[in-house]
């Protein structure tokens, strides 16, 4: 057998504990680690309630060790997935037969899936990676893996053999992007081949074992009509956002971690004219613009020697020499805020970016502090003047305590009074109560402002009547 070591007959395992209880069915793992997208997502609740027995893990562990002794991993890596899987299947069957392990066919198939995932893919993570309904996977050491599904954080039954196996999987993930994670460089960002964003932090920094966080990449990004269906925004609010995207307002999308900022930014870009030249700058390419004339740029972390870093600021500055019509910055975290504002202010109308803040007002404060942290010695008033001259609209996203995601504000930056930046809310979300299941009840409404500051822009693009109609239709009195 190709990939099998010569001494298999003698080197087989001496003892392999038979499973004393039937290992429960696990979520429908893919037959092979790839292609992941082909596997339909299994139901959310069922797999989480089942937990594999200790015996199952013991049996798997013994068979796995025997397999590793038997196969030649370097040979195996040269095979295509299907052939490698067949190889593993043959050897595992042989090990099971030699050791008289009592197992049903389905148990054997399940074990085989798990072992193939360990050897060829990302081990116990594979079934989670195969699911399309998961937003985040969070592994806190070998014994605790959580997922976020439908806005809710859920503990799964996924478990790693030990922290070493988990560390090996982390290593496998980051080595694909030419990086290394170990005690010497214990923090690492990486990306899976499917585009999912990965962060690893290793012991000793992570006290209870390697901590792995994966933001799953969604091939089919959510659209504004879908957000309307989810109740994230009303149809009228969506129309206002669509007009803001189309008529080249400069927009900051603000929100907390995982509140849906990038999703919202992506939705806004859908309304950009196909004729415009757009340049996107991101730490990890997540945006999916549909227009034909897009240049996508990505920052680069320093290499193992600490050299070669390209920062977001480098990219945004360079963008300006690339004749952009709009610049889209995935996430503004630092001094690039200054360059983005400059761009917004110098003829690149319709530029956009996201940042981390809990309200539109806080977003303005964040921009100020990012600029001052960048070492620009500008008086506070000058920075505020710059913000007022650059940013037209702040869209606030939030993940509420019931797990739902809502657009809570569409706010305009209208001017400066003395030293204070003046904003006006056009559209807000009020929470009015909570139902018996703990779901928040709320409503979106326009605040009664009939003529937003970007009215003339909307008129220039022929959207003023639609804008007026959407604002009118959503108007209702504020709840006290
Ligand atoms: N309105 C929504 N309704 C349901 N799910 C959503 C909504 N918006 C975003 N999501 C999902 O939530 C997850 C996080 O979204 P997204 O990446 O846009 O958040 P983010 O605020 O950019 O996160 P981060 O702070 O990590 O950059 C994604 O899986 C996305 O599909
Ligand atoms: Mg994001």
Image (cartoon, grey):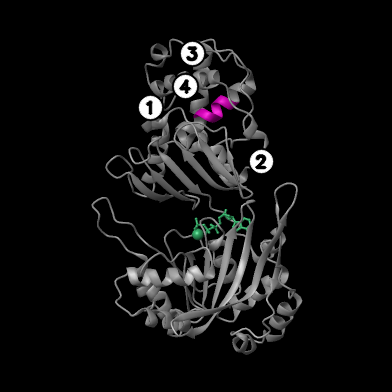
Q: Which residue is mark 2?
A: 44
How many angstroms separate mark 3 from mark 4 (CA)?
Answer: 9 Å
Q: Secondary structure at mark 3?
A: loop
The quarter of the picture where the C terminus appears is bottom right
Q: Position of residue 265 (x, y in %)?
A: 55, 67
Task: In the rendered view, tell whether residue 10 sits above or below residue 137.
Answer: above
Give the class, few, some or many, for how many residues have Cα within 10 Å of label 2's Cα (few <14, many ≥20): some
Give the class, few, some or many, for how many residues have Cα within 10 Å of label 1's Cα (few <14, many ≥20): some
How many angstroms separate mark 1 from mark 3 (CA)?
Answer: 21 Å
Q: Secondary structure at mark 1?
A: loop
**Residue 16 — which label?**
3
Q: Earlier in the sequence, mark 3 or mark 2?
A: 3
Q: Earlier in the sequence, mark 2 or mark 4?
A: 2
Magenta span of residues: 110-115
Give the class, few, some or many, for how many residues have Cα within 10 Å of label 4's Cα (few <14, many ≥20): some
Q: Which residue is mark 1?
A: 72
Identify the residue at image location x=40%, y=72%: 368
Residue 270 visible, this orientation? no
Q: Secondary structure at mark 4?
A: helix
**Residue 221 — which label?**
none
Identify the residue at image location x=61%, y=55%: 400
Q: Earlier in the sequence, mark 1 or mark 3?
A: 3
Predominant SS of the magenta segment: helix
Q: Earlier in the sequence, mark 2 or mark 1?
A: 2
Q: Secondary structure at mark 2?
A: loop
Q: Which residue is mark 4?
A: 61
Task: In the rendered view, tell whether residue 98 sits above or below residue 112.
Answer: above
Q: Residues at badges 4 and 1 in contact (C-beta under 8 Å)?
A: no
Nearer to us: label 2 or label 4: 2
């Amino acid at each position: 057998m190709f990939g099998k070591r010569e001494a298999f007959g003698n080197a087989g395992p001496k003892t392999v504990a038979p499973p004393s209880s039937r290992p429960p069915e696990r979520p429908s793992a893919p037959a092979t680690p790839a292609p992941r997208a082909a596997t339909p997502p299994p139901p959310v609740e069922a797999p989480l309630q089942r937990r594999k027995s200790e015996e199952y893990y013991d049996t798997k562990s013994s068979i796995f060790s025997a397999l590793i002794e038997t196969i030649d991993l370097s040979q195996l890596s040269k095979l295509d997935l299907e052939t490698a899987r067949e190889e593993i299947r043959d050897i595992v069957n042989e090990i099971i037969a030699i050791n008289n392990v009592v197992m049903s066919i389905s148990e054997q198939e399940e074990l085989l899936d798990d072992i193939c995932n360990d050897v060829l893919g990302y081990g116990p993570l594979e079934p989670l990676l195969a699911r399309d309904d998961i937003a985040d996977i969070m592994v806190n050491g070998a014994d605790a893996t959580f997922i976020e599904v439908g806005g809710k954080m859920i503990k799964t039954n996924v478990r790693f053999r030990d922290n070493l196996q988990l560390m090996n999987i982390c290593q496998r993930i980051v080595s694909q992007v030419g990086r290394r994670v170990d005690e010497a460089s214990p923090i690492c960002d990486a990306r899976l081949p499917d585009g999912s964003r990965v962060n690893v932090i290793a012991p000793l920094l992570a006290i209870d074992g390697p901590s792995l966080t994966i933001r799953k990449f969604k091939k089919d990004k959510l659209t504004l009509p879908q957000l309307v269906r989810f109740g994230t925004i009303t149809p009228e609010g969506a129309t206002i956002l669509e007009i803001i995207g189309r008529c080249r307002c400069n927009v900051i999308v603000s929100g907390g971690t995982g509140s849906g900022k990038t999703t919202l930014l992506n939705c806004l870009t859908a309304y950009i004219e196909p004729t415009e030249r757009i340049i996107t700058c991101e730490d990890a390419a997540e945006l999916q613009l549909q227009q034909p004339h897009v240049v996508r740029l990505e920052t680069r972390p320093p290499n193992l020697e600490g050299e070669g870093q390209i920062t977001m600021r480098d990219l945004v500055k360079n963008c300006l020499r690339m004749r952009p019509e709009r610049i889209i910055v995935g996430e503004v975290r630092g001094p690039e805020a200054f360059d983005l504002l400059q761009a917004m202010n110098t003829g690149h109308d319709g530029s956009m970016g996201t940042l981390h803040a809990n309200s539109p007002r806080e977003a303005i404060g964040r921009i100020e502090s990012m600029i001052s942290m960048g070492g620009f010695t500008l008086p506070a008033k000058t920075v505020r003047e710059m913000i007022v001259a650059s940013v037209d609209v702040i869209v606030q996203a939030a993940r509420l305590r019931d797990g739902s995601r809502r657009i809570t504000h569409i706010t305009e930056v209208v001017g400066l009074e003395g030293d204070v930046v003046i904003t006006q809310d056009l559209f807000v979300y009020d929470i009015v109560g909570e139902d018996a299941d703990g779901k928040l009840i709320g409503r979106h409404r326009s605040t009664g402002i009939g003529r937003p500051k970007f009215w003339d822009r909307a008129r220039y693009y022929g959207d003023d009547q639609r804008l007026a109609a959407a604002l009118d239709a959503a108007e209702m009195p504020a709840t006290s």
